[in-house]
Image (cartoon, helix red, strand yellow):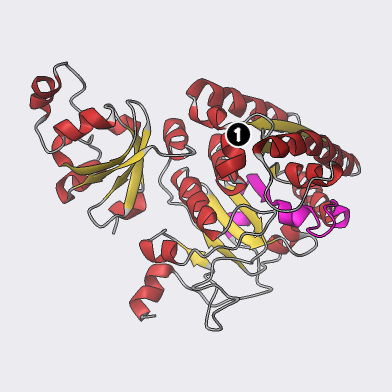
Amino acid sequence: MSDDANTTLALVASSAGAAARPEWTTAQRIVVKIGSALLVDRATGILKTDWLASLMEDVAALAKSGKEIVLVSSGAIALGRHTLKLPKGALELEQSQAAAAVGQISLAHAYQDFARQHGLIAAQILVTLGDTEERRRYLNARHTIDRLLALKAIPVVNENDTVATTEIRYGDNDRLSARVASMVSADCLVLLSDIDGLYTAPPGSDKDARRLDLVTEITPEIEAMAGDAGTELSKGGMKTKIEAGKIARAAGCDMVIASGKVMHPLRAISEGCPATWFIAPSDPVTAKQRWISGQLEPRGSIVVDAGAEKAMMSGKSLLPAGVTAVTGNFDRGDVVIIRTATGHEIGRGLVAYAKADTERIIGRKSREAAEILGFEGRPELIHRDDMALNRAHAKK
């Protein structure tokens, strides 16, 4: 790897035992994602109570210091399948839903019991894809979590796997936690993982793999490093963590990937443990931009030319004339990724036309759109107020 590449990737020598980063010490609202593999013993299907006790002790210490903590927890299906004595391996959809229904009760009781030991109140919140994508439901969920935090409760969030079939098949709590962090305007997102950060290559198969301590921009090189760190109980992997980093950073939230395979994992972060930090741009982010950048699944992509890219970064809307290609299957009002000709993501936005109409007007003047389409639409393909851009890209 060249020196220039090292600079781009923000590679810093590891420093175990160093002081906590300022992003951690100054964060007031923290979202912590906990995966199934950390909570549930893979061989027995039983909850790792000692580990959960140590985590909740850390949460209590952070709460006592004045920080607000939101937990995004997996584990319901893993616990429920054991209780129901379901077979090992992949479950059918209905089996997963049944396991989730049983496991959610056990998981909620466990959090409640350990929270009470420290004088805390745990609150369960089950969300679906629509709760983050539909604006009114998004705001309702945000207000509920805000009120719980004001009342000094610890919200424990999970996907509502008993009804949300899409999440069971394709979902992951890495991106869910990033959407929650965006929703509640968190300062820091913690992804507790079975690996202590992002490496230049899979550390289990490459002896020269090095952990990145600091990522200041998610470049194509960073994305290329994302190997699969998932397990049977953890649907995630490094690719979904990188996607979570994009969502969090776009919302102005720092993110850290740290090992959860230790007791007291949050205390370890406070003590400067080895980890990878994804630092958010310092530009202020509006509430609407947080919502746009925190969408679960963009419905497509729009490729722009250099002129359009420059115009958007200077604060202007995206016009049809500046678009060179579109992909996906989106409708009017859907979120799409905005990419450069080289494929680099520079932002996301709410598109004003469905894909079929967009394809007919790209590269054309706005005044020509009505004649081409047969109806009068907006002159902008994506209005500047409907964009969430990566401002760090503009400064390059």
Q: From this viewpoint, which residue is outermost toward the bottom?
A: 207
Instruction: Give the residue at x 67% y 32%.
Output: 160
Residue 9 spot, x, y in % from top left: 42, 69
Q: Can residue 285 be spotted in the picture?
A: yes
Q: Secondary structure at mark 1?
A: helix
Horizontal relation, residue 183 to residue 103: left or right: left
Please tell me whether residue 224 is drawn above or below residue 355 in the rendered image. Answer: below
- Graded by Cα atoms within 10 Å as few (under 14), some (14 to 19) or many (20 or more), the crowding at tag 1 reads some
As rendered, which of 87 and 151 lies closer to the eye? 87
Q: Can residue 154 be spotted in the picture?
A: no
As rendered, which of 360 and 28 lies closer to the eye? 360
As rendered, which of 91 and 245 lies closer to the eye? 91
Would you say residue 34 sits in the magenta stretch? yes
Residue 316 spot, x, y in % from top left: 22, 36
As rendered, which of 203 and 383 lies closer to the eye? 203
Please tell me whether residue 25 is drawn above or below residue 125 in the rendered image. Answer: below
Instruction: Give the residue at x 64% y 70%.
Output: 274
Q: Quadrant of residue 222?
A: bottom left
Horizontal relation, residue 84 to residue 4: left or right: right
Horizontal relation, residue 50 to residue 204: left or right: right
Please tell me whether residue 321 is drawn above or below residue 219 in the rendered image. Answer: above
Horizontal relation, residue 101 to residue 44: left or right: left
Amino acid residing under circle 1: Thr
Residue 78 spot, x, y in % from top left: 76, 47
Please tell me whether residue 202 is drawn above or below residue 112 in the rendered image. Answer: below
* Range of magenta residues: 22-50
Quadrant showing the N terminus: bottom left
Would you say residue 344 sits in the magenta stretch? no
Q: What residue did someone put label 1 on?
A: 165
Q: From this viewpoint, which residue is outermost toward the right?
A: 117
Quadrant showing the C terminus: bottom left
